[in-house]
Amino acid sequence: MLTTLNEDGTSNITPMSSAWALGNRVILGLGDGGKRLENLKRHGECVINLPDPTLWRQVEALAPLTGKDPVPDAKVHQFRYEKDKFAASGLTAFAAKHVQAACIAECPIQIEGNVVDMRLTGEPVRFAVVEVEAIAVHPHESMVIGEYHIDPAKWSPLIYNFRHYFGLGSELGKTFRAEV
Ligand SMILES: Cc1cc2nc3c(=O)[nH]c(=O)nc-3n(C[C@H](O)[C@H](O)[C@H](O)COP(=O)(O)O)c2cc1C
């Protein structure tokens, strides 16, 4: 769940699944015409909040909502405008340390970040490839091992599998470079 900063200083929440991470970079795929991209173009700070499977109903409560007013023509039949997505989903905001967008307390991992590059693509423009520099990561203490590692047996991401919500199955094994 991506939180971005609205023009009035409140935070918008966008459920999103198109993301991958390498080193301190997270690459996001964001459709054009919504509030998320409008917010990131104006103010490139965000928080990437990673939900676990217990949060799928909150994610789904946000699914038919947009922070964009008026609702874009292409979405008008299925979406409605909602300014306060924290209230609409029952999720709890807390202040990030380095960015102005809010963190979502219920998510076991929050990644604070700054947009460092953005490329609009599609003909006509349909979405943006957004490169975010991760500047702080806040994992819930219960799944941290030592200073740097997350216990993979304790971290379970919510998986969006072709428009259906899933969790992980049980562990199959680990790679030769695993440190924990
Ligand atoms: C589980 C889930 C995953 C989604 N993944 C993406 C995504 O990766 N990129 C994207 O632009 N929209 C994605 N969406 C759609 C946006 O959440 C949706 O367009 C929403 O209305 C955007 O809100 P906003 O206009 O307030 O940003 C996803 C929606 C759901 C429910």
Image (cartoon, helix red, strand yellow):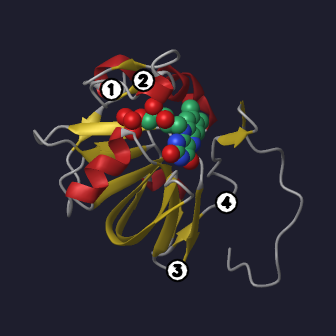
Residue 71 position by quadrant: top left
Distance from mark 3 CB to nearest ligand 1 atom below 8 Å: no
Mark 1 C-beta closer than 8 Å to ligand 1:
yes
Q: Residue at x 20, y 64 (%)?
A: 98
Residue 114 in the figure: left or right of residue 129: left
Going from N to C along the chain, the mark reached first, 1 or 3, is: 3
| Sooner in the amino-acid sequence: mark 3 or mark 2 | 3
Q: Position of residue 83 (x, y in %)?
A: 25, 24
Q: Mark 1–mark 2 contact, CB under 8 Å?
A: yes
Q: Is residue 162 left or right of residue 141?
A: right
Mark 2 Cβ and ligand 1 under 8 Å apart? yes
Residue 54 image position (x, y, % from top left): 59, 30
Q: Residues within 10 Å of mark 3 (few under 14, many from 20)?
A: few
In space, the residues marked 1 and 2 are separated at their CA atoms by 8 Å
Q: Which residue is mark 2?
A: 65
Q: Which residue is mark 3?
A: 23
> Distance between the Cα atoms at labels 4 and 2?
32 Å
Q: Which mark is residue 152?
A: 4
Point 82% across, 77% down: residue = 175
Q: Earlier in the sequence, mark 4 or mark 1?
A: 1
Q: Residues within 10 Å of mark 1 (few under 14, many from 20)?
A: some
Mark 1 residue type: Lys
Query: In the figure, 28 relative to 131: above or below?
Result: above
Tag 3: residue type?
Gly
Name, please, the residue furthest toward the front: 124
Residue found farthest to the left: 8
Q: Secondary structure at mark 2?
A: strand
- Residue marked by disc 1: 85
Q: Position of residue 126 (x, y in %)?
A: 52, 51
Comes first in the chain, label 4 or label 2: 2
Amino acid type shown at disc 4: Pro
